[in-house]
Image (cartoon, rainbow, N blue to C red):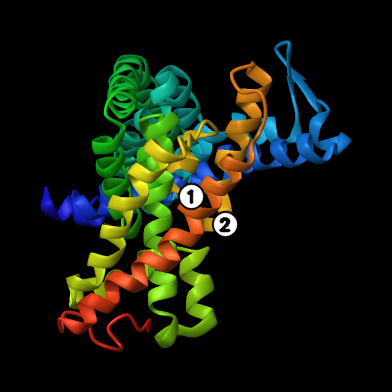
Amino acid sequence: MKSFLKRKNIEISVKRYLIDALGAMAQGLFCSLLIGTIINTIGGQLGIGFLIEPVATIAGTDYTVGGLAMAMSGPAMAIAIGYALQAPPLVLFSLITVGFASNALGGAGGPLAVLFVAIISAEAGKAVSKETKIDILVTPLVTIGIGIALSAWWAPALGKAANYVGDLVMWATTKQPFIMGILVSVIVGIALTLPISSAAICAALSLTGLAGGAAVAGCCAQMVGFAVMSFKENKWGGLISQGIGTSMLQMGNIIKNPRIWIAPILCSAITGPLATCVFKMEMNGTPVASGMGTCGLVGQIGVYTGWVNDIAAGSKSAITGMDWAGLVIICFVAPAILCPLFNRFANKLGWVKPGDMKLG
């Protein structure tokens, strides 16, 4: 069995499934659901006709350019997962159907369903790939057959479970905004820097509202915090690559000296409750944006999109100066001030030394 799995490149490990696959799934989400949301937002706010007018009508539903991208989120996630699992071409292409089915049947918890179903379907497809003379028939049939069966069996339950957990987190944040603001901000911020996907986690749990705002705060504390703290070592390139790229670049340095992580974590423990209790910052855009922070300014675009959605729904009258002030302070100003301040104390204690955050 071990030799068979090795020959088929089937590696049953936490790294392969919860790091590689989850990270790739987030990229699939970004290239479909998130990009589609951004296109719709730009088109709506700037009044660009070809971005807000329907370009296709399918089964009686009109789709804009952004709408078409958003509709393909299931297939995009599944293909990304298959790519991370190094699936051969026939398996990879078959995952298009699997991703569509699991995402559609999973409802609000579609991304979580896609993660589980796509992994199992891809590995099953890899197991039978090129084992018969009619591979072009067997591999797609096995991959799609298992994928559709698991989607019908698991996806609704996984969707309900993810939705329940997400609702529970959001309900708890509403009832206890201070405590949950800290917990959500710290946990999602840590997930952002770890080699897993905070965006995929937030998407799987449909994390929005105050909890989504706290998640954005935690992610920004990590990204902006590391970017500013390490400016002396990494200059402008490091500021940009971490500030609007990812704080995951510091993971190697964190392994060498975990204490460099103290400042961003402390910062997120402050900005989280500031977001929930003081500025009431909610993230009511696409849930995946809750876990993106300042990566391409997606988190901020998500918050803004949420404001627009709330105004359209009648639950918000207008975007206020307090809204903008909260967004700028939570996402940029506070991390840029607090993280270097906390890091200075760590320097004085000898916990962090110059060069500890130097990027290779």
Query: Is residue 138 shown to the viewer in this render?
Result: no
116, 324: nearer the viewer: 324
Q: Measured from the top left, where is residue 261 in percent x and y?
A: 25, 67
Residue at left 63%, top 26%?
309
Assign a secondary structure to mark 2: helix
Q: Is residue 354 above or below residue 127?
A: below
Q: Is residue 308 above or below residue 81?
A: above
Assess disc 1: are there few (<14), some (14-19) or many (≥20) residues with their C-alpha within 10 Å of its C-alpha: some
Q: Measured from the top left, where is residue 94 in percent x and y?
A: 48, 35
Residue at left 49%, top 61%?
333
Q: Measured from the top left, where is residue 318 in percent x and y?
A: 67, 29
Q: Which of the two discs, 1 and 2, labels the residue nearer the N terminus?
A: 1
Residue at left 31%, top 29%?
173
Q: Is residue 168 left or right of residue 300?
A: left
Residue 291 occupies which quadrant of the picture? top left
Q: Is residue 285 left or right of residue 140?
A: right
- Looking at the image, is mark 1 or mark 2 nearer the viewer? 2
Instruction: Residue under label 2, please give it.
Output: 296
| Residue type marked 2 | Gly
Instruction: Residue under label 1, please give it.
Output: 27
Disc 1 + disc 2, Cβ < 8 Å: no
Assess disc 2: are there few (<14), some (14-19) or many (≥20) residues with their C-alpha within 10 Å of its C-alpha: few
Query: Number of numbered discs present?
Result: 2
Residue at left 80%, top 31%?
52
